[in-house]
Image: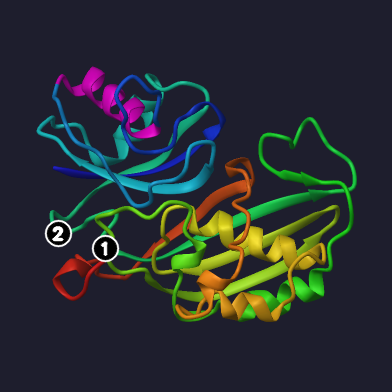
Amino acid sequence: MRIKLVVSYDGTDFRGWAAQTGQRTVQSTLKEAVRQVSGEEIEIFGASRTDSGAHALGQICHFDCGVSIPGERWAQVLNRQLPLDLSVLSSREVKPTFHSRFSAFDRFYRYRILLHRPDPLRSRYTYFYHSPLDVERMKEGAQLLVGDHDFRAFTEELDPHVLNTRRVLYSFKVHASKDEVWVDVVGTAFLRGMMRRMAGALFEVGRGYRPVEEVSRLLDPEERNRLQWPVVLPARGLCLHRIRYGRHPRDFRTASED
């Protein structure tokens, strides 16, 4: 059976999604919970490799298992084994052709910036800045990032195995929500640290440190190395909200590279 999970977690005390030797990660914690339930050593595949300290409301993952537990029951049995900062929201059996990462159509991330005064109840989930930001200028910069671009200047650390740094962003919205500024991005896939550096670029625009037109120059391979690349904002303000799949999910690796 192939089981699909929708999981939520507070990433503060995790060293990201991907398993690392001697580190507490979301992937390794889920694997151990499945092992305790099934007695099997399985592999769990996630749709997005969230950074250390980043959060998720709708991360998707899957695993293959030979234990005859109904798909919809896995959420209940796994939550009995999981810590308080990680929860399975739902579970179900899916077709063997489904892949949580390579069948995904798009991903929706939000970065939250808290303004004016720190709030201890939101400090784990927002980046605090003490002064106002020019949200209208940030909106202008955000629109320059929509579309199919080379985002090399917006990655934190380039994986040597990633040769293609082009990605497609379907929407990029910036809006004020009371005393916060939300940076909402929907795209096919993201490079390591890409979301946090894009938010950093708009943060610099909003506080008057970087002119709006430099955002498009950072997308130009001939221009980007002449500029100082944007700051990478802390992971605590970043949350993976949603991952979408088509009505009949398929593995996109058969059509194009990730």
Q: Are marks 1 and 2 in contact (CB under 8 Å)?
A: yes
Residue identified by numbered label 2:
97
Residue identified by numbered label 1:
103
Front residue of 57/117: it is: 117
* N-terminal-most mark, 1 or 2: 2
* 144 vs 129: above or below: below
In the picture as drawn, the residue positioned furthest to the left comes out as: 66
The span picked out in magenta is 26-39
How busy is the neighbourhood of tag 2: few (under 14 within 10 Å), some, or many (20 plus)? few
| SS for dot 2 | loop
The residue lying at 82 percent from left, 35 percent from top is 119
Apparent side of residue 150 relative to residue 3 in the rendered image (left or right): right
What's the amino acid at mark 2? Thr
The residue lying at 38 percent from left, 55 percent from top is 158
* 54 vs 111: above or below: above
Front residue of 253/36: it is: 253
* Residue 38 x, y percent position in the rendering: 18, 23
* Residue 54 x, y percent position in the rendering: 53, 41
